[in-house]
Amino acid sequence: MEHNSNFIRNIIKDDLASGKRKHVITRFPPEPNGYLHIGHAKSIVINFDLADEFNGKTNLRFDDTNPLKEDSEYVHAIKEDVQWLGYDWDGLFFASDYFQEMYERAVLLIKKGKAYVDDLTQEEIRAYRGTLTEPGKDSPYRGRSIEENLDLFERMKKGEFGNGEKVLRAKIDMNSPNINLRDPVIYRISHATHHNTGDQWCIYPMYSFAHPLEDAIEDVTHSICTTEFEDQRPLYNWIVEECEMESKPQQIEFGRLNITNAVMSKRKLKQLVDEGFVDGWDDPRMPTISGLRRRGYTPEAIRAFVRETGISKGSGVVDSQMLDHFVREDLKLKAPRTMGVVRPLKVVITNYPEGQTEMLEAEINPENPEMGSRQIPFSREIYIEQEDFMEDPPKKYFRLFPGNEVRLKHAYFIKCEDFVKDENGNVVEIHCTYDIETKSGSGFTGRKVKGTLHWVDASQAVPAEFRLYEPLLVSEDPTELEAESTEPEVEKSFLDQVNPNSLQILQGFVEPNMKDASPQDKFQFFRHGYFSVDPKHTTENKLVFNLVVSLKSSFKL
């Protein structure tokens, strides 16, 4: 794999060359409180690729310090996503594996006079913290003795206090220009059952305290995260230093991945799931890895897309069409070609012999001849798309209309003679004639036609459901969608961005050789796009295809 130069790679090279580091260990540390999304895919690719390049190791670690939001369902889903993307972790860890050591390190801070138990409420702590322009105020409990703090912290651990009654805070600097250093809370009380440790603990470390300790315990050399944690880096280093950790990881930040028409907030994604706007975290309209997988995106395309976006400090917005481009590039040589009709209209070829079926031959993939050929049945009755016939067409309409001739892909020229309408005036059947001399591959040069239509033989057509997708959210600006607010009208505006036309379900037909298609099999349907067999709704008696991407795009790299 070709390695693009980036500032993180250069840091690692310099660290190894100077002897500052003897080896490289990275980690991917998700919190198991939801499903991974395309933004996480960037972090996965960066961490695993960099470790692989420098013969290092990458740990998968679950930052499970909040029992109220975490679940083993998410743990399982995250493992599946990382492996599907093509990566194997070297170590599998949980923050909860280290709860005892974290507790002991917190006790060490108390003994050093670097932490204290505070009785202020969450609101009071916030008020005492100050603002970006005003310094904070000391808590009235900041001066507690080491002995009193040790006693209170031990009693917190034993469960003598209720939720929110007390917290443990680091004692740093209430006048620091960096608000993160104004005596941050490092432990809180939570009488909740943990997915991994059960009821063993009723105090839990805060993420900002636990994370640097986890990195240090695992001897992580380069702790790579997004720029939203840049202001936390001084606290990260303070904890590693003051807790007297032997290993000293280095935190490095990169710009997060934002994509048009997509929201990456787990809370907002969960809201879409909980309120029924989608049929689950793996809905093909979701930017989750499980949603992209179910829709039919490939891990190769996602990895190529992430690598192309590069690594920088800036958090720019990437056009979602760029991801679609890499999906097309990946599938064009892999996906068999076939024909499917999503809005069927019957055509009767009146001069074709009744009861006769002939088999036509076509390449499975013209761009990959090694895939061989397929047989397509053709008989007197076929289905075409409704949009491929017009009774009274505009100029430059080259498909079927009375008196016009078109080519059927892989078959013959047919000419529209007349049509049948139902009692509501809808065209329900077209009557055509065919010219036996015009068979595809025969070398016929007698005349040319401008329109080529796809079709499916009616006698052997396999019924299929087609699910066509548009972006789930109409707003292209992810920063607008991500805006966090407690104002109800702002929350409402996020849901107002849900596209009512994001899913269209149509009933049509596919070629008979598709009847044995399996979940996640991918095909290129002539004129429509790339489709993948949906694993959730496909049954033994019903084929369901998800539109992965259209065939063409105006997007250019």
Image: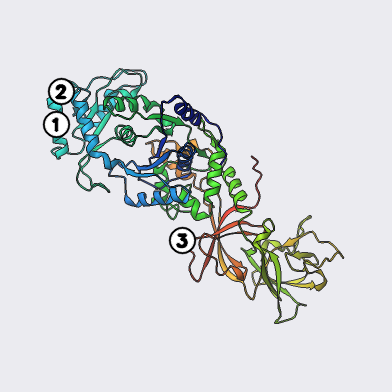
Residue at left 46%, top 30%? Answer: 12
Q: Amino acid at mark 1?
A: Leu
**Cα–Cα span, label 3 and label 2:** 58 Å
Q: Is residue 450 above or below residue 43?
A: below
**Where residue 486 sits in the image (x, y, percent)?**
37, 36
Q: Is residue 396 left or right of residue 155?
A: right
- Crowding around mark 1 (Cα neighbors within 10 Å: few <14, some 14 to 19, many 20+) is many
Quadrant of the rendering where the C terminus is positioned: top right
For residue 305, above or below residue 435: above
Q: How many marks?
A: 3
Q: What whole-number distance in Å separates the C-alpha atoms at marks 1 and 2?
A: 10 Å
Q: Mark 3 or mark 1, which is nearer the start of the sequence?
A: 1
Report the side of 74 relative to 188 (left or right): right
User: Residue 536, which numbered label?
Assistant: 3
In the image, what residue type sits under mark 3? Answer: Lys
Badge 3 marks a residue whose secondary structure is loop
- Mark 2 — residue? 144
Q: Residue furthest right?
A: 446
Residue 546 position by quadrant: bottom right
Percent x, y of residue 267: 39, 43
In contact (CB < 8 Å): disc 1 and disc 2 = yes
Q: Earlier in the sequence, mark 3 or mark 2?
A: 2
Instruction: Classify the position of the N terminus by image quarter.
Output: top right
- Is there CB contact under 8 Å for labels 3 and 2? no
| Front residue (pair 444, 493) | 444
Q: Earlier in the sequence, mark 1 or mark 2?
A: 2
Q: Which residue is mark 1?
A: 152
Q: Is residue 553 above or below residue 4?
A: below
